Image (spheres, rainbow, N blue to C red):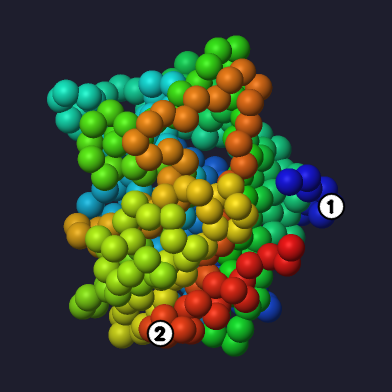
Amino acid sequence: MEHSGTVRALDADQPVGLQVDGREVASYVWRSELPASTAPRPFLHPVRTLAGTVVTDARPHSHTHQLGISIAAPDIGGRNFWGGRTFVAGHGPAWLDDHGAQRHRRWLRHTESELAHTLHWVDQEGAALLSERRAIACVPLTSDAWTLSVQTRLANATDRPLPIRSPASLGRVGAGYGGFFWRGPAVNGQVRVQSPAGTGVRAVHGTTAPWLTVSGASGGAEWTMLFAPADATTAQDRWFVRARDYLGVGSSLTWDRPLVLEPGEQIERHILAVVADGNLTEDAAAALAEAARPAA
């Protein structure tokens, strides 16, 4: 994941707009003044369909630490990079003073449809636990859909083994979240979740399905989000899916056992999110998932 080329001058206080065919479809908040309890980090919001329907939420009343589309983790070396309460084994969720933050370091590339930069994931004292290279691209797909590509390379920046844990690895069954995460918008009526693994949250949650969709309506406009791994490594990660209390989908770095990075060791993940107008059928979703995959 090497990047070089155009880097435009950016205002440090303003989000970066990203376009598809001249239409702004996403805003990347790369530097923000958020409370420490949110585990401050860059995020994409609002993200829009080509028709202009917003398909993300950020700092909602429920789970105010959820920020559009971001990369976050609930436990890295004992620090909370997810935000909100920390799950404590044998106790449950608790408010702790243990939140980390992601800090922008350097732009590698920025055009109207792509960006790449380096970040440090730091603890409260400013010590880096992870170093990251992140690349985001907005790619036209059809007249009704476009693809958001999110790539990350995470490396242990410490001199000791660094465990990455989910609450599921500490005893909270099913709570295997951590990694790429989308917080969906408020919807009118029901949402539909489907994948080759089946229909509904129970059929998809915790699986390694090759793609999944969430379809809903906001403000009277129907939309579908399709999520798919872009490489074989990412395809081994399980999906976290929730539609009760809030709408969210994640591709989990680890599920019910810790992922331990040795000093200097790195991992890479690549997720595709197809943003579509309309309520897609299963056949249409499968065709979009195939069309969105990068060429071998």
Which residue, given by chain and number where applicable, does mark 2 sit on? 281
- Can residue 280 be seen? no
Q: Secondary structure at mark 2?
A: loop
Q: Nearer the viewer, residue 47 or 233?
A: 233
**Disc on the earlier residue, 2 or 1:** 1
Callout 2 amino acid: Thr
Q: Residue furthest left?
A: 91
Residue at the image position 68 percent from the left and 43 percent from the top: 117
Seen from the viewer's position, the closer of residues 11 and 18 is 18
Q: Quadrant of residue 229?
A: bottom right
Q: Residue 5 got which mark?
A: 1
Residue in the picture at 60% in, 52% down:
232
Image coords of residue 38 (percent x, y)? 36, 38
Task: Report the amino acid beneath label 1.
Answer: Gly
Figure quadrant of residue 282: bottom left
Question: Residue 240, relative to residue 144: is it above or below?
Answer: above
